[in-house]
Image (cartoon, rainbow, N blue to C red):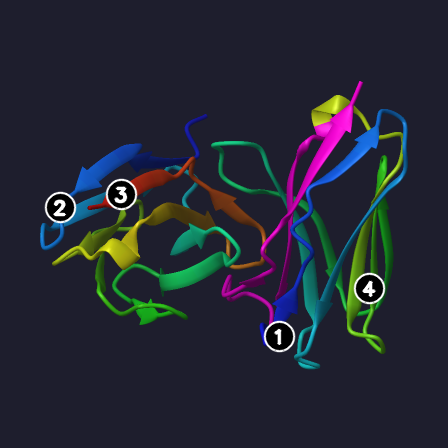
Amino acid sequence: QKEVEQDPGPLSVPEGAIVSLNCTYSNSAFQYFMWYRQYSRKGPELLMYTYSSGNKEDGRFTAQVDKSSKYISLFIRDSQPSDSATYLCAMSPTSNTGKLIFGQGTTLQVKP
Amino acid sequence: NAGVTQTPKFQVLKTGQSMTLQCAQDMNHNSMYWYRQDPGMGLRLIYYSASEGTTDKGEVPNGYNVSRLNKREFSLRLESAAPSQTSVYFCASSDDNEKLFFGSGTQLSVL
């Protein structure tokens, strides 16, 4: 069983929809949680960064961490065609290492 | 604003051939990483370098070697390529936190 599980999709939604992307994990030592966005044929770029449990909001994006359930989510409000990409969750037990464990990514398509 | 630059972008090798993937960053970051990305597997860490002069194995180091030439450059070498090394390779750098800056990748096929 992988340490981090993520449904690969693809997930197709109409423009303006609320999107929910999720990851589950098995290692209770994970403390740092991230979401990266990857456009086709590009490298991933960091979207959201959270430490421990709780919510973090940045514009149309909200990251949520529930450590008791070992479950993290990324919500996208008012989704746009430009949000079409692969979204990768990543996590780490300690900070300042860059040795992240990534989920396999969920491919999202937002249709105009 | 180059960020992280990887060369080459594409490469086809025959089994047993060797090659070096180059990576350079212009952000003065201490840490640099090599990941591979395979369908259904996500990104997996091959090697990393926490600072100039140091390197350490990641999750999948077998069949690879690395060199941290200086603070800017971190190369990945395949001594004898195998079909299992067909993948997309990403170099990344960071300022000692979880915010990794990735290059645009090298698509490698080993026949």
Query: Measured from the top left, where is residue B23 in percent x and y?
Result: 30, 42
Residue at the (59%, 76%) spot, across then down: A1
In the displayed orientation, state which residue is furthest to the left.
B17
In this rendered view, identify the residue nearer to me: A28 or B94: A28
Q: Secondary structure beneath disc 2?
A: loop
Q: Secondary structure beneath disc 3?
A: strand
Q: Any mark on residue B14, and which?
A: 2
Marks 4 and 1, the one that precedes in the sequence: 4
Query: Measured from the top left, where is residue A67 in percent x and y?
Result: 81, 74
Q: Any mark on residue A93, and which?
A: 1
Which amino acid type corresponds to the residue marked 1 in the rendered image? Pro
Question: Mark 3 and mark 2: span between their CA atoms?
Answer: 8 Å
Write the start and end of the magenta stretch as one range. A83-112
Question: Mark 2 and mark 4: span between their CA atoms?
Answer: 45 Å
Q: Would you identify the image quadrant in which residue A80 lies?
A: top right
Q: Chain of mark 4?
A: A
State left or right for residue B83 relative to residue A44. Answer: left
Up-down: is A74 above or below B50?
A: above
Specify whether disc 3 shares its chain with disc 2: yes
State left or right for residue A82 relative to residue A66. Answer: left
